[in-house]
Amino acid sequence: MTEKPKLGVYICHCGINIAATVDVEAVTEFAQSLPNVVVARNYSYMCSDPGQLLIKDDIQESGLNRVVVASCSPRMHEPTFRKALQEAGLNPYYLEMANIREQDSWVHQDREEATAKAKELVAAAVAKVRLLEPLTPREVDAEPAALIIGAGIAGIQAALDIGDAGFKVYLVEQSPSVGGRMAQLDKTFPTLDCSACILTPKMVDVANHPNIELLAYSEVEEVSGFVGNFDVKVRKKARYVDVSKCTGCGDCAEACRVAGRFPNEFEEGMGKRGAIYLPFPQAVPAKYTIDPERCLFLTRGRCGKSPKCVDACQPGAIDFEQKDEIVTFKVGAIIVATGFDVFDAAKKPEYGYTEFPNVITGLEMERLVSASGPTGGEILVDNGEEQIVPKEIAFIQCVGSRDQSVGNEYCSRVCCMYTAKQAHLIKDKIPDAKVKVYYIDVRAFGKGFEEFYDRVRREGIRYVRGNPSEIFKRGNKLIVKVEDTLTATPLEDEFDLVVLAVGLEPRADDRKTIDLLRLSQSPDRFLMEAHPKLRPVDTASDGIFLAGCCQGPKDIPDTVAQAKGAAASALIPLARGKVSIDAQVAGVIEDTCRGCGFCVSICPYTAIELVEINRMGHMVEVARVNEALCKGCGSCSAGCLSNSIQPKSFRDRQILPQIAALGGIK
Amino acid sequence: MDLNQLRKVAAEVVSRDDVKYLIGWRRGTFGYRVAPYFVEDAAGVDELIFSPLCISNLATYLTLVEKLPVPRGQEPDKRKVALLVKGCDSRAVAQLLVEKGVKREEIVVVGLPCPGMIDRDLLAEKYPETDKAAELRWNGEDFLLVGEGEDIVIPRAEVLAEKCRLCRHPNPVLSDITVGEPVKPWAAADDSGVAEIEAKGAAERWDYWEEQFSKCVRCYSCKSACPLCYCEDCILDRLDPIWVNRAVNFSENTAFHLARAFHLAGRCVECGECERVCPAGIPLGKLNRKLAQTVREEYGFEPGLDPEAEPFQASYKPDDPEEFIL
Ligand SMILES: Cc1cc2nc3c(=O)[nH]c(=O)nc-3n(C[C@H](O)[C@H](O)[C@H](O)COP(=O)(O)OP(=O)(O)OC[C@H]3O[C@@H](n4cnc5c(N)ncnc54)[C@H](O)[C@@H]3O)c2cc1C
Ligand code: SF4
Ligand code: SF4
Ligand code: SF4
Ligand code: SF4
Ligand code: SF4
C-alpha cells in the first residue's frame, strides 16, 4: 500500500461474554503499542449503533485507513463492520476481525492466559490488516424465476407462495403425481382434519396456477450457474400417454392385461395396480402413466394381439413411441423439498416385520384407516390364517428413531403424535378394541399436541413405558415381549395387530440431489442448513434453500412454515432483480499455474475451469475462476501444489505474517 | 533383452516425421556406468542399450525441457518426444498424464518390462569400478558382469536395488510399443520397506530422521531428479513469501523434506530417483513409500496406474471411511 497505514483497533466486551474472561483494558493498552495503531478502544457492544459510530467517527476524524475489530466470529458480524467502514467512506474489505470470543473467552477460564491469547490474536490481525487490498463487490441481474425440487406439501406451498408473488415457478416432481407423503395420510394430528381435504385443493391449485409450470414425472438432471443465474436441465420421463389427450377416465387401467398384478407404491404395497395406472384417485395431474418395467408391450415388444389399453382408450392417448423429453430453463433461486423416506422396519428383525403380515408400519396403518385405502377404510388384517378385524392392537414407538444401533440418533418428531392419532382412529372404528402403546418418552411439544395426547389417553388407550425386545407368534396371536419400566414387570402381551411407529429417514435417493447442487449433510444425514438457528432455510450455497423433511423430520405445520420461509428467502433475489457477488474470491496466478486441474476437481462450487492462454508462444492451460460461483472457501488453494490459486484477503503473503505474529515473530 | 529388437523399434520411431527425438540410455564414459541418451536419428540407435544399470527414470526429462519463448510469427515445435520406460518410469508418465504435466499426444512411450535393476553403490562396494569398460547383463534371476577377464555371476540378492525388491509393477502400465516379454511380478504387495522404522517409538523415529535430515546439504538434487517435481515456480524456491528459509540446518531441512513429501503423497510413483541421486545418502525412499502406503491403505488409492484417473488430491468418495480423522 502506498499511503502509510493508520490502524484503529476496537476491542469488544460483548457484555460480559468477553470482558469477564479477557482483561479488555490490558488488550487495548497492548494494541495501542503495536506499530501503525493510531487509536485503540474498547466498548461494551461494538456491534451496537454507538459501537459502530466509534469506528465511523475515528475513520473520519483520525483518517484511519485500516480497522481491526476484536470481538466475535467474523461469521457473525463481519458484514456489520464492513458496512460501517463503507458508510464512513472506507473500502469495506479493509477490515480484519480477531475472534476473541469463540476462540478465546468462551473456551478458556484462566483470565490471565485468555488475556494473553487475546493480545496475540489482536497482534496477528494487526499484522494482516496492513496487507489487505481494496475489493469491490459486483452486482448481476437475477432471473425472475424459481425451481422447486419435490412436490410434497413443502414444495407445493413454496410454489404457491412464489407464484402468488408474481414470479415464475418450475415445480419438478419425480413421481407421477404431486402430493408427497401427506397424500398418503388419512387424518392429521392434532386437529384430525382429513389430509386429502386440506391437501387436494392445493394440489389442484399448483396445476392450474398461471405462474407455475408443473413438471411431474420429471427429474432434474443438471444445474449450473449461481444465485440469480442457474441453468437447469430437466428430464421429463416418457409416460407413454399423451397428457393432452388423456381425460383420466381410467378405461385403460381397467383393460390392462396385467391389471391388479403389481403392488401399488402409494398404498405401501397393500393395494394393487396394473402396468398403466393412476397412483391414487385424487392424483394431480390426473393423467395415467405406463410403468415401463411392468408393461408387457414395453418389456417384451408385444401384449396379446394388440395392447388392451390402446384398444380401450377412446381419445387414443396411448403412445408407445413417446420419448423422454429434455427441457432447459433459467432460474434465480432453487428450493429443495425432496422430503423423506420412512425407516425400513426390516432393519429391526426382532419385530418380525418381514415375517408376520399383521406387523405393519405406521404408514401402512395410514392407508389401512383411509376411506380411499385398499380396504376402503375398514381395518382388516391377515393374522397368518384369516382376515380379521383386530381387537387387541399394539403400537411400538421410536422404531428406527433414537436408536444408535440402526444409526439414527435423532427423534423423528412425528411418531408419538401419529401413533396417538392412529390409536384414536382405531378406537373410533373398533370401539371395543384394546389399544396399548409402548413408548420410551412421549414428546407432545407442538401447539395442541399435549391436549391431543391427553384426550387420547382419556379414550382408554393404555400407554406402557417400555421398549419391546421381541415379537413372536403363539397360536394365532402375536406376543410382544417387553419390560414395563415403570413397575419393573416383564410382560408378554398378546395382540392381533402390531403397528411399528417407524421414524423418518433421509431419502435414499437424495445423494443425486446432493451431488447435483453440492449440498452438505448434517451428521443425521439430512440436508444441512446454513445455520441451525439463524439461517434454517438457507444452504451454504447462495440462492439454494431447503424446505420440509429433507432438512430434518417435521410435522405438517412446521413443514409448511419452513416452506413459506424458503419461499420468502427465494423471493429476495427475484424481487430485487439483482444479486451482489462477494469480492472475496479466489484469484489465479497464471504465471505459475501448472494447469494440472487439481483445483478444478476440488472446488465444491465448480467455480474453476481450465482455459488456454498463450505463454510466450506456447499455448498452455491455466485455471480461471468464475467469480460469481466462487465462495472464497479456499479449498482450491489447499490443493494447489505451487500455490498458484489463492483467495483474496487470504493470500499467502497476507496470512503468513499473521501466522508469524501469532508465534510472536515480528 | 534383445537389443537388436529394441534398436529396430527405436530406429522406426525416430525416423517418424512427427517425432523429435527418443530418450533412452547408452554406455557412459567410465567403467560400467550408463548415461541418458537423446537419439535424434536412426543412425544413433546403435548406441542404445537396456541393461540392469539403466535405473534412471527418463520421464523426468519430459518436463525438464525448457519451453523457450517462440518468436512472433513462428510456431512452437509440436513434434512428439519418444522415451523408453521401465515399469516404475511408466507410472511416472501415467501420473504426469493425470495431472496434465504432459499430454498424451506429445509423447511416444516405448515400454520395457523390467527384470530388476542394480543399485550401483552396492555393486561398487563388491566390484569396484575401473576405467576399463565393462557391462552388466541379466543372467536368469541373477546378473552377469562382463569385463576384461572371465564373466562374473552376481547373485540377485546382493545388488538388487531396494526399490526394485519392493516393486509391484515391473511391467509398464502404459506404452505405445512394448519391446520384450512381460515379466512376472515378484514383490509382496504390502511391503513398503518401512516396517523397521514403524516398529520404533516416536522418540527413536525422531532421532532417526533428525540424523538423516541433518545430513542434507540442500543441493535440491532430489527435487530436480523427481519426475513429479516440475512446478514452474516451486514453493521451495519461492522468495515471496518464503516458505522454507535458505539456511541449511535441521529445522529448515525438515521443513523442506516434509513439504516435498506431502507434495508427493498420492503422486509419488516410488521410482526411487530422489534417493538414488542424493549425495548425502538420505533414505528418502522410506519417507515417500510410507506416505504412498498410507494413501493406499487409507484411501485405497495408488497413483500412476491409470492415466485417466482423477488425481488423488482432487478425488473424493462419498463413502470414504475417514477412519483416521479424529
Ligand atoms: C406415518 C406418518 C404419519 C404422519 N402423520 C402426520 C400428521 O398426522 N400430521 C402431521 O402434521 N404430520 C404427519 N406426518 C408428517 C408429514 O408426512 C410430513 O411432515 C410431510 O409429509 C412432509 O412433507 P414434505 O413435502 O417435506 O415431504 P414429502 O411428503 O416426502 O414430499 C417430498 C416430495 O418430493 C418428491 N421428490 C423427492 N426427491 C425428488 C427429486 N429428486 N426430484 C423430484 N421430486 C422429488 C417426492 O416424490 C415427494 O413427492 C406423518 C408422517 C408419517 C410417516
Ligand atoms: S491453480 Fe494450482 S491446482 Fe489449479 S490448475 Fe493451476 S497449478 Fe493446478
Ligand atoms: S475458493 Fe477455490 S475452491 Fe473455494 S469456491 Fe472459490 S474457487 Fe472454488
Ligand atoms: S519422490 Fe522420489 S520416488 Fe517418488 S516419484 Fe519423486 S523421485 Fe520417484
Ligand atoms: S516440491 Fe511441490 S511445489 Fe516443488 S516442484 Fe515438487 S510438487 Fe512442485
Ligand atoms: S538430494 Fe539429498 S542432500 Fe540434496 S537436497 Fe535432496 S535430500 Fe538434501
Image (cartoon, coloured by chain):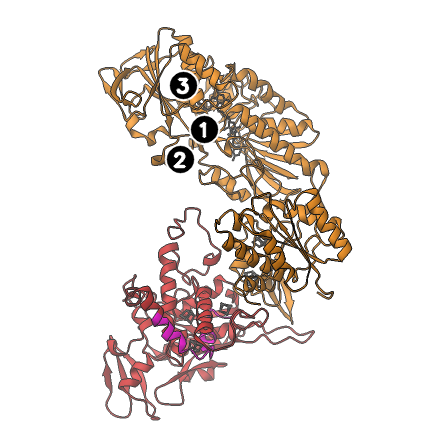
Chain colours: A orange, B red
B193 over A145 or under it: above or below: below
Which disc, if any, is residue A640?
none
The single residue placed furthest to the top in the displayed view is: A432
What's the residue at 32%, 86% (across, down)? B135
Q: Residues within 10 Å of mark 2 (few under 14, many from 20)?
A: some
From the image, tell me which residue sits under label 2.
Answer: A409
User: What amino acid is at disc 2?
Assistant: Glu
Residue A304 visible in rendering: no
What's the residue at 57%, 30% (across, down)? A562
Horizontal side, residue B92 vs residue A610: left or right:
left
Q: Residues within 10 Å of mark 3 (few under 14, many from 20)?
A: many
Residues flagged by tags 2 and 3 on a common chain: yes
| Part of the protein shown in magenta | B207-231
Q: Within the magenta stretch, is there residue A170?
A: no
Q: Within the magenta stretch, is there residue B210?
A: yes
Horizontal side, residue A628 vs residue A299: left or right:
right
* Viewer-nearest residue: B21 or B86: B86
Q: Is mark 3 within 8 Å of ligand 1?
A: yes
Local secondary structure at mark 3? helix
From the image, tell me which residue sits under label 3.
Answer: A365
